[in-house]
Each structure stands twice: as C-alpha cells, then as structure tokens.
Image (cartoon, rainbow, N blue to C red):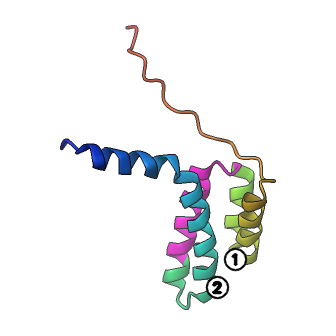
Amino acid sequence: MADHSNYQKKVISRYYENRDQIDEQRLGELVTNLFLATSAKQKSKHWETAHGVMTRLGVPASRIEHVMGSEDPTVLAAVVEELQRGVLKLEKPKKPDKSPDPG
C-alpha cells in the first residue's frame, strides 16, 4: 500500500470521523434520487445503495427489511427523518478484534 503524506492521512482520518454524517446526508439524497428516477434500472441501483448505507449506519435489520420490502421512497424518507431527529436506535456493527491469534 502506498504511503500517504501527513496531509492525506489527516484528510482520510477526518473522512472516517464524519462517516456517519456523510452517510446520513447520502441517504437523504437517495430519497430524492428515488423520487426522480425514471427507469427501473436507476431505481434498483438507488435501492441497492440505500441498503448498503443503512447497513453501514447500523439501522436495525428488521427496519431495513421493511424499507426494502416496501420499495417506497416515503418509507425511506421516514428513516432519514428519524436519523436526523436522533430517535432511531442504531445497532453499530462490532469492529473486528485486532488482537493476535492465540493459536
């Protein structure tokens, strides 16, 4: 892997520090994109992206299933609204343990 300059390391670090806010904004943009999408292919791609963003944010799996099953942008918009208000309980995925293997 290429070495990064100190500036690049800081930019990368700030990106990951603000990843949740970036993902929340992206989810809101996807709602708009879904309302404006004209082809089934566009809609499918936007829903696929929304699924990934919700998973990364830690939206409960049951809620993701409900949103994806409905394929209704207004249901996704409700999730975005709850995220912005801070009412939706997120399930953060556990980070992998970086300790050495004892075996």
Q: Position of residue 26 (x, y in %)?
A: 56, 67
Residue extending farthest to the top is 103
Residue 5 appears in the figure: yes
- Reading the image, the residue beneath label 2 is 35
Please tell me which residue is depicted at 70% across the width and 58% down the height of the picture. Answer: 65
Front residue of 43 and 97: 97
Q: For residue 73, which numbered disc appears in the image?
A: 1
Q: Are marks 1 and 2 in contact (CB under 8 Å)?
A: yes
Residue extending farthest to the right is 87
Residues in magenta?
Answer: 44-60
How crowded is the residue under tag 1: few (<14 C-alpha within 10 Å), some, or many (20+)? some
Q: Position of residue 4 (x, y in %)?
A: 23, 44
Q: Is residue 59 above or below residue 25?
A: above
Amino acid carrying mark 1 in the image? Pro
Q: Is residue 74 above or below residue 3?
A: below
Amino acid carrying mark 2 in the image? Phe
Please tell me which residue is depicted at 52% across the width and 66% down the height of the picture. Answer: 49
Number of disc labels? 2
